[in-house]
Amino acid sequence: MEDEESVKHRQSLAFSVAKIAEEEGSKGHWKASSATIHAVAEFVHVYATTMAQDMEAFAKHAGRKTINQEDVKLCARRNPDIRAQLIAYAREHCPAKDPGERRKRKHAEGPGKESGAIAVQNEDSHDM
């Protein structure tokens, strides 16, 4: 049985799909049935859940706790059209970072640490 939050997410998703179908249908003079809207909403939910799990695994593999745009691009690696759209979106909406800004270096100190040792701390990105 689904929890209350999951039910709300699915309802919200179905509402959004219905609005998109209504807007797009009005341009092309077509209507989507209620069953079609719910089927598309379910597909989007399952797809998004799978993507979230994949992106989490990619970030974890890279030693990060935060999902970033590279993880999103990896999810789209088998669909060149979507990948190209994601890259174009990122170029337009996400400021480019200086490669040197991605990692901060700190000198490790404390018991058991050798003097002069350098520890690498990941700076996780929140952008797409």
Image (cartoon, rainbow, N blue to C red):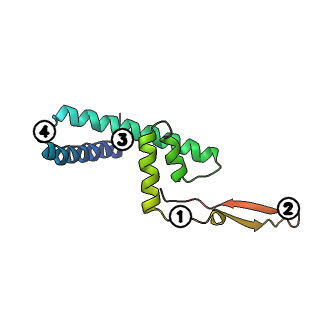
Q: How crowded is mark 3: few (under 14 residues within 10 Å), some or many (20 or more)?
A: few
First in sequence: mark 1 or mark 2?
1
Q: State the residue position of label 3.
A: 3
Q: Residue 30 carries which label?
A: 4
Q: Which mark is residue 96?
A: 1
Q: Is mark 2 on a helix, strand or loop?
A: loop
Instruction: Name which residue lies at 11% across and 41% down.
Output: 29
Disc 1 to disc 2, C-alpha distance: 35 Å
First in sequence: mark 3 or mark 1?
3
- Coordinates of residue 43 in the picture (x, y in percent): 33, 34
Q: Residues within 10 Å of mark 2 (few under 14, many from 20)?
A: few
Q: Which mark is residue 113?
A: 2
Asked if labels 3 and 4 touch by Cβ distance under 8 angstroms, the answer is: no
Q: How crowded is mark 4: few (under 14 residues within 10 Å), some or many (20 or more)?
A: few
Q: Label 3 sits on what residue type?
A: Asp
Q: Residues within 10 Å of mark 1 (few under 14, many from 20)?
A: few
Q: Name the side, left or right, on which 27 lies relative to 55.
A: left
Instruction: Name which residue lies at 58% across and 43% down.
Output: 58
First in sequence: mark 4 or mark 3?
3
Quarter the N terminus occupies: top left
Disc 2 to disc 4, C-alpha distance: 68 Å
Disc 4 to disc 1, C-alpha distance: 41 Å
Asked if labels 2 and 1 touch by Cβ distance under 8 angstroms, the answer is: no
Q: Which of 93 and 121 is in front in this view?
A: 93
- Coordinates of residue 44 in the picture (x, y in percent): 34, 39
In front of the other: label 3 or label 2? 2
Asked if labels 1 and 3 touch by Cβ distance under 8 angstroms, the answer is: no
Q: Label 1 sits on what residue type?
A: Ala
First in sequence: mark 3 or mark 2?
3
Disc 3 to disc 2, C-alpha distance: 47 Å
Q: Label 2 sits on what residue type?
A: Lys
